[in-house]
Amino acid sequence: MTDTNALLPAYLINGEDELKRETVLKRLHARIAKLGDIDFNHDVFHGESASGDDIVSACNTVPFASDVRLVVVHAADALKKSDAEALVTYLSEPSPSTVLCLVARKLAKNTRLYKAVAAVGKKAVIDCAPMKKYELPKTVRAMAVTHGITLDDAAAQHLIELVGENTVHLDAELKKLALSHTAGGRPLGVAEVDAMVSRTAEVKPWEFVDAFAARDMRLCVDLLSKMDSASPYALVGMCATRLRELVTAHSLAARGQSGTKALATQLKVPEWRVKNHMGWARRWKPSELRHAFSSVRECERMMKTGSDPDETFLRWLLDTLRA
């Protein structure tokens, strides 16, 4: 009963990192399985369709051939208000022989359900927030080691570009790479990743706009071909915003204020958002920026008056970057 006493009557596994959520849930499941037959003492519900009364009934069921039951509610942030309220009421006096585990992508801290779980104990809420983008390559390399392979920095970054930032999908691709390469060999590079991994992640619009700001025509065309759901109307608007930011960077530089802090203050954005803007601005003449910015209106007019939007945007893009 020592392990049982150490368990809290409820947990909230909350955050958008799917692999973290799965890992925490597996550990909790394994811990409870040591206390008895988990197969007879395990109920699973889904927030989109679950009834609060049914979940509470499962929590109040006496365990069979075990010291504790496990009741899991996936997508707990999708519970209807009345069903969530049933759990809030239950958590005011939870069953001592049940562990209720709520799994959610983004259950807000100001909800009554979040507060009810948090009140159960200091360790009741387990944060599975996704890591920052700049942290992901290092994490991917660490994940690779758990599968018996190593990746160099470029390969880890390339894998993220192909697969996206979902850690479950990244882990699955690392498993596939491990099956095809001998453990203990040299670190895998971009070529090995390309040979085994297909692109499943769509390019993010801001990646395209960054390439546009850098005047990298080849990269822009390549990225554009991988953006199946991107609207040309949205992209031309984002490019116009970036052109305006680069015009501002040029103006500040002309006044002797070439640092990112002055630009961030002027644009009213965090400094990290403009860390590359000054370098990009130097690739454009002020006259080129003004011409590109003024040509946006004609591009939008043509897109809205019968011209094919995708072709019109591509023509504007190429003409602008060639100027």
Image (spheres, helix red, strand yellow):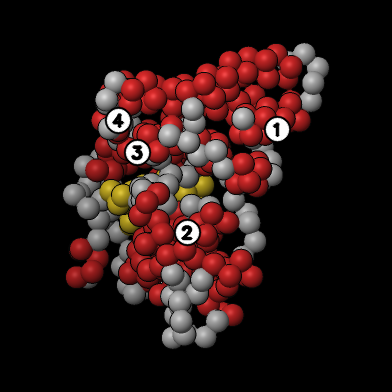
Residue at mark 2: 157
Q: Is residue 46 visible?
A: yes
Label 2 and label 1: CA atoms lie apart by 27 Å
Q: Decide which of 284, 156 is in the foreground and name it.
A: 284
Front-most of 225 and 126? 225
Between discs 1 and 4, the one toward the N terminus? 4
Q: Secondary structure at mark 1?
A: helix
Q: On the rendered structure, is 131 left or right of 224?
A: left
SS class, disc 4: loop
| Disc number lying in front (2 or 1) | 1
Contact, mark 2 vs mark 1 (Cβ under 8 Å): no
Tell me which amino acid carries mark 1.
Leu
Mark 1 or mark 3, which is nearer the start of the sequence?
3
Crowding at mark 2 (Cα within 10 Å: few <14, some 14-19, many 20+): some
> Distance between the Cα atoms at labels 4 and 3?
11 Å
Residue 239, image x and y in percent? 55, 28
**Can you tell which mark lies on residue 314?**
1
Residue 258: assigned label: 4
Quadrant location, the C terminus: top right
The amino acid type, in three-letter code, at marker 4 is Ser
Confirm or deny contact between disc 2 and disc 3 (CB under 8 A): no
How crowded pointer 1 is (Cα within 10 Å; few <14, some 14-19, many 20+) is rated as: some
Q: Is residue 34 left or right of residue 290?
A: left
Q: Which numbered dot is residue 275?
A: 3
Label pair 3/1, CB-CB below 8 angstroms: no
Question: Which percent across, then down, holds residue 313?
Answer: 69, 28
